Image (cartoon, rainbow, N blue to C red):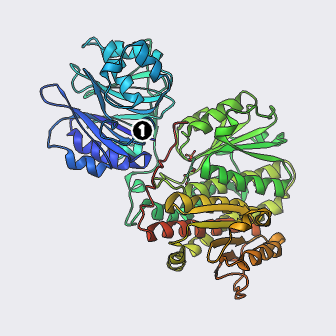
Amino acid sequence: MCGIIGFTGKLEAQEILLEGLEKLEYRGYDSAGIAYFKENGSISIRKTAGKVKDLRAICDENTATCGIGHTRWATHGGVTNANAHPHKCGNVALIHNGIIENYHELVATYDLEKDLISETDTEVAAALFNKFYDGENPIAAIQKVVPLLKGSFAFCIIFKNNPDMIYAVRNVSPMVAATCKDGSFIASDLTAFIQYSKKYFIVPEYAILTMSKEGISLQELDGTPIEPEFLEVNWDITAAQKDGYPTFMLKEINEQPAAITRTIAPRIHNGLPDFSADNIPESLFENCHDITIIACGTAMYAGMVGKTLIQDFLGIPVTVAIASEFRYEKPVITEDSLVIVVSQSGETIDTLEALRLAKTKTAKTLAIVNVKGSSIARESNYVLYTHAGPEIAVASTKAYTVQTAAFYLIACKLGLVQNKLTKTEALEFIQNLQNVSDNIAEILKLSANIEELTKRMLNATDTFFIGRGLDYTLSMEGALKLKEISYIHAEAYAAGELKHGTIALISEGVPVIALATQGHVYSKVISNIREVKARGAYVILLSMEENVTDASICDVHIPLPKVPDQFAIFEAVVVLQMIAYYTSTGKGLNADQPRNLAKSVTVE
Ligand code: F6R
């Protein structure tokens, strides 16, 4: 949700900002802009509705060495040049990620209406900083303004008369910073500046960061100095590049075998799950009578797999909660409940707030998170990092499979700790999990066939994904993936539920993607498929049968490598991801940057 970057140092700033924005564009791509100090100390702004390439086209040549840049995902006010960031008011220019919830009150209380030309909450903040800025002391202005703001914010601010200095402050919305021989950097996430520094720190909430050419300083709002806590990433810039693939999404689909191995291998010792290096104690699993999994979107669908697996396999009751609902409910969890939050970014605001609420009820919170040091990882009692590497495409793929793999490790650990699995069963289970990467590699070889079959989907307006048990949980993810990047309406249904209403929507040629990998319900699903086939559906069937030639069942059959039923979802989901991907590209769409979306949803 909005990408921000700032640089001050020895190098020319404009290219650093533009390249950084290109890397942050997955966070929002409605409009983009930069502000920099000119040689005479005045502030220059370039901004436009559109993408970073449109911004690049309107930038002039300059040698400025200090500036800030923004790529927007619109919340308040439409996609217009005026609403693009940076916003300048008097002696202040700033960029913002977040939402200032009390901006109407601020306008009225501080008589700011006359200063505003856009429809954004951000410009109100710029006007407020300007009002409290005496022309000399930015810190004093920040100290006065920040307590007045309600909502989430990450601001980078430049003040006239303080050339080459950037000031930053945040609440909730993420911001990381680094300092190195070339200068000081700040951004929403470190992909924006990782080629300059692999060491970075998370800007603490409500701290004021001052960036100058010489380095950075950090202080509490009251002026007390703070030492930044530096972290180091274990991936480099190549992980955040397309590496020869036409899109990040295709690259990330293909990275799944390696990502799964990276995630599970360090947690397997002597063939059994072991979380000791993660500092996750066995006691977390010993007394847990029930589990609540909380997440949003694809991460929640990974949680649905976790639920079905753990409940069916171990008989432990599991609830999956949509984070945006959970955070406003009265949760029925006790101190013995295990709460698992799942998030690729670790910054999704609803998941973070849901975690905070859960922590008021139980100290057994475990986060499955991809981004190291992110808010959810920091605030959870325990964290199990997935090692997908940076996920840049807006539609999540590799993050989902590694989250799912993490649930398989957790299920096995729970089973062992609670004596619901024998050591022999656990060893076999983990062996099957270790085979998943190779099986996915086989599936990836089908890409040309899948691309071919999606030609049939390009003109579809409605599609259905059906399955039972684990296949049903997967159907939800398959449907979400298709709709978000191809804009084709897709619905997931438990196969047996269709005849209770939805089957009325099946007519000649409507694509139905049917999953039939679960042996105990195989014949039931096949009956349900026959029901839709009889009404004219165009059925694409995924199953572990070598051959399905019966035309009364399907039009196209995609055979998956034979594995134990519990593990078939890993292969099947990759097929679903490719169906979505090739349908999107077949329609000429940008799969990496679907309309209206942005990665990392840090606003409600
Ligand atoms: C869909 C997708 C989203 C995210 C959701 C949660 O492809 O990516 O549904 O899964 O916004 O994001 P994280 O995992 O960062 O909390």
Q: Quadrant of the C terminus?
A: top right
Query: Looking at the image, is 391 positioned above or below residue 81?
Result: below
468 vs 265, nearest the viewer: 468
Secondary element under disc 1, as helix, strand or loop, is loop
Q: Residue at x 46, y 49 (%)?
A: 596
Q: Amino acid at mark 1?
A: Ser
Percent x, y of residue 353? 62, 33
Within-10-Å neighbours for mark 1: few <14, some 14–19, many 20+: many
Position of 451 compared to 541: left or right? left
For residue 361, which quarter of the picture? top right
Query: Can residue 217 be seen at all in this image of the molecule?
Result: no
Query: Can residue 388 be seen at all in this image of the molecule?
Result: yes
Query: Looking at the image, is 177 positioned above or below residue 342?
Result: above
Count numbered badges in the picture.
1
272 vs 53, nearest the viewer: 53
Percent x, y of residue 479? 61, 61
Percent x, y of residue 152? 49, 29
Query: Looking at the image, is 474 positioned above or below residue 510?
Result: above
Q: Residue furthest left?
A: 40
- The residue that label 1 is drawn on is 188
Percent x, y of residue 402? 60, 56
272 vs 371, nearest the viewer: 371
